[in-house]
Amino acid sequence: MTRRVVFEGRLLPYLLLAPQIAITLVFFFWPAGQAVWQSFLLQDAFGLRQTFVGLENFRTLVSDPLYLGAAGRTLVFSTAVTLLSMSPALLFAVMADRHIRGAGAYRTLLIWPYAVAPAVAAVLWLFIFHPAIGLLGRSLRAAGVPWDYKLNGAQAMLLVILAASWKQVSYNFLFFLAGLQSIQKAVIEAAAIDGAGAYRRFWSIIFPLLSPTTFFLLVVNLVYAFFDTFGTIHALTAGGPGKATETLVYKVYVDGVVNLDLGGSSAQSVILMLVVIVLTAVQFRYIEQRVHY
């Protein structure tokens, strides 16, 4: 028999929900509403007056080659970060789920990187791959490899992808490991008795049963790649060289904070929010059909 919580008065449930509702209103709906309203305005050069321009900011963006270039880089960046952060995490989770010596310490070490702030993680990678002071960066140049991510845009993009992916592997590892431990061992043992090898057991039994976890992480990692990688890019490359690592979320910062184009920056944030909502809706519409609960 399921026990239900019954409140004596009607006021108490609303009082308990009020703090969370207030936080959501103040830190999400209010800023989002301000951004939407600001996207219809144009400020003068001194920031003293605002003029309502309607959809002019959005029309300017869709015809701006710099913005379209940032959108293309964001697509490549987010896809690469999602794949590179989920694939190793799944491999590590499968290895950690085995009965091996020191498994507890192994799992703890894999979780630690998630506690590192994005900017700090970027500084760690900077000390490794910096062409002048980085341990690996200096080694590459000494070996004759023309490594300099401060001048080479492809190398800079590769570096921020690796740094952002490394930061997210631990998060994905936790969920994959929890999903693996929730699978009944009797199912896997029955497949082994029937003669299925390790490879066949993983792709035919384990991975399909992990589909809810994989789907959840796919949505979370795409949102992470679009929004939460600002600190990594800012500390590592600052969008350079030559805007080679300037993604959509970083361009919002550059246009709004550096160039003081609040209307254009707000329009970019609105478009970015809509893109993420559409991508999430598409995933729930088409990918969730393949999920086995």
Image: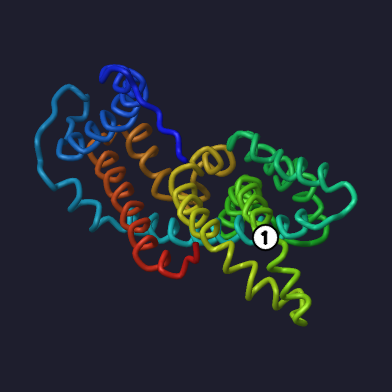
The x and y percentages for residue 287 are 42, 67
Q: Give residue 187's quadrant in the image.
A: bottom right
Q: Nearer the viewer, residue 34 or 202?
A: 202
Residue for point 54% across, 59% down:
214
Q: Nearer the viewer, residue 89 or 67?
A: 89
Residue for point 32% across, 47% down:
273
Task: Please give left or right for residue 191 compared with residue 242 in the image.
Answer: right
> What is the tally of numbered marks visible in this picture?
1
The x and y percentages for residue 51 are 10, 33
Q: Give residue 18's quadrant in the image.
A: top left
Q: Is residue 159 visible?
A: no
The x and y percentages for residue 97 are 75, 55
Name the kind of residue labelled 1 in the image: Gln
Which residue has dot 1 on it? 184
* Residue farthest to the bottom, as pictured: 195
Task: Please give left or right for residue 63 compared with residue 121 in the image.
Answer: left
Q: Tell me if residue 15 comes above or below residue 38 in the rendering.
A: above
In this figure, which colouring scheme has been used for the structure? Answer: rainbow
* Residue farthest to the right, as pictured: 101
Q: Tell me if residue 198 comes above or below residue 35 in the rendering.
A: below
Local crowd at mark 1 within 10 Å, few (<14), some, or many (≥20)? few
Judging from the image, what secondary structure is the residue with disc 1 in? loop
Task: Please give left or right for residue 8 compared with residue 182 in the image.
Answer: left
Q: Is residue 48 visible?
A: yes
Q: Nearer the viewer, residue 35 or 236?
A: 35
The x and y percentages for residue 34 are 23, 31
